[in-house]
């Protein structure tokens, strides 16, 4: 499993960290770092999941800011994918609405979003209390099921084990 510390050290340069902290000076620096790490988790998994983004607006804000620093963002994409010209695109639903006027009223692909949660647990370990808040589907399932965070993570791990048996 890949730790938050490893993600931070490997992918967040001192320059981008300074920039994000400066742009989001009104937010606790620890939360800025957490949001950045959660974005990195998604970006690393993104080649397996297109469509609606599974995280909240707070993480999306980090993505928008990072993209504005085009050279840093391009270098990040290459480093995450390990190949040259591996740009990870971002597209707003407002733009996509031109091509599909119903895009904002369509139901999200919950199977795909759930598979992202499974991938998250597989690659990064169980959701932590200060991290699940950035993943709306995970938080909704956990809270609406009236189970503890530990029970939620155990359930995801069980589904993952069963899935591995089915796919293995």
Image (cartoon, rainbow, N blue to C red):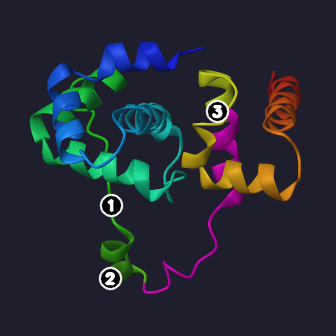
Classify residue 30 by image quadrant: top left
Helix, strand or loop status at disc 1 = loop
Q: Marks 2 and 1, how far apart in space?
A: 12 Å
Spatial CA distance of label 1 from label 3 is 22 Å
Task: Say whether disc 2 or disc 1 marks the residue closer to the N-terminus.
Answer: 1
Q: Quadrant of the N terminus?
A: top right
Mark positioned earlier in the residue sequence (3 or 2): 2
Q: Residue placed at 48% from the left, 32% from the top?
A: 41
Q: Nearer the viewer, residue 77 or 136?
A: 136
Residue 31 lies in magenta, yes or no? no
Residue, disc 2: 98
Badge 3 crowding class, 10 Å Cα cut-off, few under 14, some 14 to 19, many 20 or more, is some
Q: Which residue is mark 1?
A: 91
Give the left or right position of residue 53, taking residue 24 as reference.
right
Q: Residue at x 85, y 29 (%)?
A: 154
Say which element carries label 3.
Answer: helix
**Residue 145 occupies which quadrant of the picture?**
bottom right
- Residue at the disc numbered 3: 119
The location of residue 93, given as percent across then percent down, is: 39, 71
Residue situated in front as seen by the camera: 20 or 74 = 20
Magenta stretch? 101-118
Residue 139 place in picture, x, y as percent? 69, 51
Q: Nearer the viewer, residue 4 or 101?
A: 4
Question: Residue at (19%, 20%) from the top-left corner?
Answer: 14
As helix, strand or loop, the secondary structure at mark 2 comes to helix
């Amino acid at each position: 499993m890949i730790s938050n510390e490893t993600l931070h050290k490997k992918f967040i340069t001192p320059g981008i960290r300074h920039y994000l902290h400066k742009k989001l000076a009104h937010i606790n620096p620890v939360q800025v770092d957490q949001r950045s790490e959660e974005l990195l988790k998604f970006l690393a998994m993104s080649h397996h999941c297109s469509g609606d983004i599974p995280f909240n607006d707070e993480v999306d804000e980090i993505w928008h800011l990072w993209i504005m620093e085009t050279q840093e963002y391009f270098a990040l994409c290459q480093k995450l994918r390990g190949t040259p010209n591996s740009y990870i695109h971002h597209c707003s639903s407002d733009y996509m609405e031109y091509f599909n006027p119903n895009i904002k009223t369509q139901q999200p692909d919950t199977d795909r979003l759930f598979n992202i949660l499974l991938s998250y647990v597989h690659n990064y370990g169980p959701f932590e209390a200060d991290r699940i808040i950035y993943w709306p589907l995970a938080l909704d399932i956990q809270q609406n099921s009236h189970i503890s965070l530990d029970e939620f993570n155990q359930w995801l791990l069980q589904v993952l084990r069963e899935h591995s048996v089915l796919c293995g």
